[in-house]
Amino acid sequence: MILARNHQPPLNGNSKMRLLFIISCVVLCQTLFGQKYAPVLVTNGKKFYQHTVLEGNTLFGLQQMYECPVEEILNANPGIERGFTEGQLVQIPVFEKTLMHTVEKGETLFSIARMYFVSVDSIATKNPGSEAGIKIGQRLKIMNATPRVQIDLPSVSRDEANRNVPAPRDSVREKFIVSFHDSIISHVVLSSETMYSISKRFMVPLEDLMSINNLESSRISPGQVLRIKLKKENVNKVPIREVPSVNETKKDSIPVFTPKDSYKIALFLPFNLDSTETLNKGLTSAAWDYYMGARVALDSLEKIGLKAEINVFDYQSRNKNLDQLLASSEMKKMDLIYAPFQAKESEKIAAWSKVNKIRTVFPVSVPSSLLEENKYAYAMTPTNDFLAENLASYIHQLHTNQQIVLIKSEKQEDQLNYEVFLSTFKQMPAKASRPRVIEASWSDYKKYEKLGTEIFYIFLSTDKEKVLALLKTYSEKSNVLVFGLKEWVDYKEVNSEIKNKFNFYYASPTYFSFREPTIIPFHKRIRSQFGVDLSKIACLGFDVTFNTSANLLLGKKIDAGLISGYNIFQSGTGNGFQNKSGFILKFEDFESNKVEWKKN
């Protein structure tokens, strides 16, 4: 490692020795008398602030102090995610920027250049006339400057240093030392950040961030100040990195039940057996299909050692609704509950399970808010943001030299998909040919076609009219690949009109095909046992029931089911667990087929 210095004429041998002596003296003086600003070192051509950990420092505090994303600090200091100790040296990556400097007494153009690790010529070029002299109070524009970071100072006695070192101003302390009692902080947006990456870092829902800042769009700019409402628990977790990176999985966090001779399991399904007033034939049919899959799963679990009493509840029954079922003393004896399909009922179950400390599995996708501060909740279907992450990872792997164009939707509800994809892609590891995402609007995306012969168009939108227009334009162009959403497959114009032979890729939480080797014997079993053909929802019933019961009750490692993957993630201690496994599918010739890939 060498000490960073601005670009100056080459030094001869004697000059180098004098410079090294001066630097040694400076470093010694900084050690003895305390440092007002963080020193900077260059390692392998990259600049790093050298921060000595003080009492009360946290990763969150360092991120705020140096305006450096937590992920960058973690990458530069392997092992620091386990915490750090007072006196430990932490390297903080430097992000250069343009700033204005006000000349103070005794400063010269040379001293200012050294201050910001730039050349004298670069300052003179941007500030005509400064080469002839500068004046106190004059404002200078500094390009590609290494910002000075004021840091706390160690306690040094007069006898040790023969001088008084002034303590940091209160305003400085307040800026860099996080108060664990504050519920709202201010965050300055960095150049590499998106609204989604900020929401993930601080464990605050994207919708809440937009609401508290009165934003109509998720688009933000570097330097913008956001108000972020935090919980005390979230702040305390930052030093041990309770916010996982995109690639991190916490399977070890899933607790296993204390072994029992027999377990009590509750299965909630919307059969609607005794009423026609609220009958939804499609929902009732799905409930029966799901039950068949769950029944086969329970039989299979019994063969591998699970002893359990299964209680099936029709929560749409006229005689006993969900509220009455949850109020019964019988329900509090359950060890594991499989939650209803619908959102309203899922919310009730989530709140109830948190209060009564009974673990509950949600078979279909639920809002991430249901998992917040509820370690008893398990969501088995990946949410759209995890699917967008999977798609970003796949495109990153697939890319060689294609132009990657991300088309921004005009629909507000599509903003999360856009933000997640962009944020995830930017965090992907570097490749020999580093891919770059071009952000485009619907009105101008076509102009990027001339930039390269091969193009990836990503349009994560449910704007049906525009989706169909995009597919029709590029359905027969071999140099263009289109990436979209699983919802596109449900459009009748896509899956049932022979004239529209569309091809595109999308991320999906499941993959169902009658030709799959695991599906063929299961189909035969469903036919034999129930006399009906297999459905996708029956496979889901099997997967959710078998995977979670085998894992939670028997402690068996499960990686995949019939149509689902199994990769459980916990976003912070005390929160619930989310399955984030999914598939990349290619829709071609009116059917979807699985694409082999491995998430980064």
Image: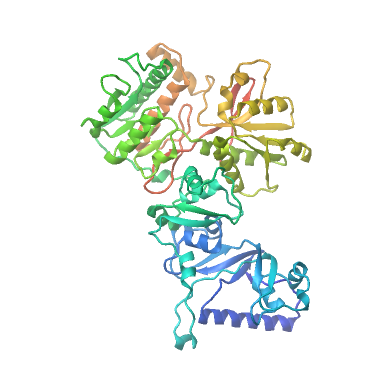
Q: Residue 598, can we see it? A: no
Residue 443 versus residue 511 in the image, above or below: below
Q: Residue 370, can we see it? A: yes
Q: How many marks?
A: 0
Rendered-image quadrant of the C terminus: top right
> Quadrant of residue 108 in the image?
bottom right
Q: In front: 535, or 316?
A: 316
Q: In front: 300, or 152?
A: 152
> Quadrant of residue 110 in the image?
bottom right
Q: In front: 490, or 517?
A: 490
Rendered-image quadrant of the N terminus: bottom right
At a point 48% along the width and 84% down the height, the residue shown is 164
Q: In front: 189, or 264?
A: 189
Report x, y in % for residue 352: 30, 36
Residue at the limit of the structure toward the left, as seen here: 329
Q: Is residue 395 left or right of residue 381?
A: right
Q: Is residue 513 left or right of residue 291?
A: right
Residue 232 versus residue 498 in the image, above or below: below
Report x, y in % for residue 35: 53, 76
Q: How is the image coloured?
A: rainbow
Report x, y in % for residue 433: 70, 47
Q: Is residue 110 left or right of residue 153?
A: right
At a point 56% along the width and 37% down the height, the residue shown is 412
> Quadrant of residue 48 in the image?
bottom right
Report x, y in % for residue 541: 40, 25
Residue 307 versus residue 18 in the image, above or below: above
Residue at the limit of the structure toward the top, as seen here: 531
Residue 454 versus residue 178 in the image, above or below: above
